Amino acid sequence: MVPEDIAGYIENLHGRFAELEAALADPAIYARGAECRRVSQEHRKLETLFRKFDDWRKALAELADNREMLTAETDAELRELIAADIADLEERAQKLEADIQISLLPPDPNDAKNIIVGIKPAAGGDEAALFAGELFRAYMKFAEKKGWRIEVLDQTDTELGGIKDVSFSLSGDEVYSLMKYESGVHRVQRVPATEAGGRIHTSTVTVAVMPEAEEVELDIRPEDLRFDVFRSSGPGGQCVNTTDSAVRVTHIPTGIAVASQQEKSQHRNKEIALRILYARLLEHKQQEEADKQAADKRSQVGTGDRSERIRTYNFPQNRVTDHRFNVNTFDLPKLMEGELDLILDQILMIACERRLDQLRQA
């Protein structure tokens, strides 16, 4: 059962809901992107919570009615039908109750943000680069299914059709709240197309998922940034531009550097490099704060360390295993076609259960 104090708390949220509706009725809010996004998402979250709460109360009322009917009914066949309805209603009420409690969990402050994702092959040479490309395409298809906006910021391909490095942004509802579970090392086990002996090779790809930074979140002085320009290069190192259009920007205090050569325009490459740099600096800042508090804010998604092996894609066994949550899916081709929900649904459920357990113990 949802405790009475929680039920009362939900009823009191209608005042906050009215405030959000009034804010969204003001045309001026749509010129303030970050605030509009935050208010819209909070409004949708409360709307969903109220609907689930109403459905839960209706399920309880139907359950009470059916139990009374079962007590009064003497016909065996009718009693069997009523008992089946009661079992269904109990299951539905329990699921709604769990959903309600999950909806009340304190949100990750980054969940409402858009993200920048970086993918790089790690160990495994050409095979790792090929899998990096496959993972990139899987994310693109997943984003399309979710209706997210996709922008490739920087991409360097290999001669064999793999990816040496790619950075892209995703914008839309629940982007970070879902994609944050992708940060870390992804390991692939399979027989490469170039392997004549049929031996299984193991390669790894690193994925970094970073919330996009708002300018107000970072205090960066112009003198802390160093800009270098150079000629962009393509697969194999050949020059693809005769002008110095590629840009590398370095944040001197931290040593974090980002290069972009995606566009022909030096100005555009500078914008892209700064956008990725700001995301990395925000990630760096948040990790430092978490370390100081001795409480890793990403405890529910592993350490978030890019060196942490989070998932294995075993092609011979058609299995994907997430090591943080000990979950598997046995439809690897479908997952690589963008059906990430096959494993993310399981991850989200376990992550929420862990957070609920922590709240109960607190």
Image (cartoon, rainbow, N blue to C red):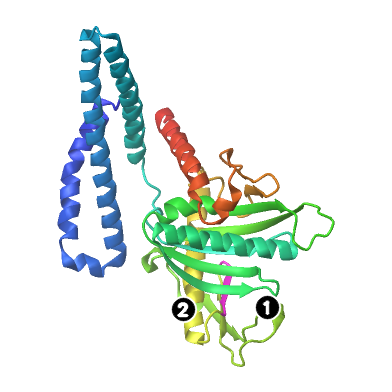
Callout 2 secondary element = helix
Vertical comparison of 299 with 109: above or below: above
Q: Could you tell whether 11 is left or right of 88 in the image? A: left
Please rate how many residues cluster around mark 1, counting C-alpha atoms within 10 Å: few if below 14, some from 14 to 19, many from 20. Answer: some
- Which quarter of the figure has residue 257? bottom right
Residue type pointed to by label 2: Glu
For image coordinates 22% across by 24% down, the residue present is 62
Q: Identity of the amino acid at label 1?
A: Pro
How far from the left and from the top, in percent, is residue 162? 66, 68
**Range drawn in magenta:** 254-261
Give coordinates of residue 312: x percent, y percent.
65, 48
Please state which of residues 252 and 281 is positioned toward the viewer in this rendering.
281
Residues 249 and 139: in front is 139
Q: Is residue 116 left or right of residue 1?
A: right
Assign the N terminus to one quadrant of the image: top left
Q: Is residue 321 above or below residue 136?
A: above
Res 298 visible: no
Report the residue that reaches farthest toward the right. 197
What residue did someone put label 1 on? 235
Q: Residue shown at 68%/53% (left/top)?
A: 188
Name which residue lies at 37% across and 60% down: 172
Between marks 1 and 2 in the image, the one whose residue lies nearer the viewer: 1
- Determine the secondary structure under disc 1: helix
Classify mark 2: residues with Cα within 10 Å, few (<14), some (14-19) or many (20+): some
Q: Is residue 244 visible?
A: yes
Q: Is residue 96 magenta?
A: no
Asked whether, in this view, residue 201 is left or right of residue 210, the answer is right
| Distance CA(mark 1)–CA(mark 2) | 23 Å
Circles 1 and 2, Cβ within 8 Å, touching? The answer is no
Q: Position of residue 289 (x, y in %)?
A: 48, 52
Query: Height in image: 349 above or below 1?
Result: below
The residue beneath circle 2 is 271
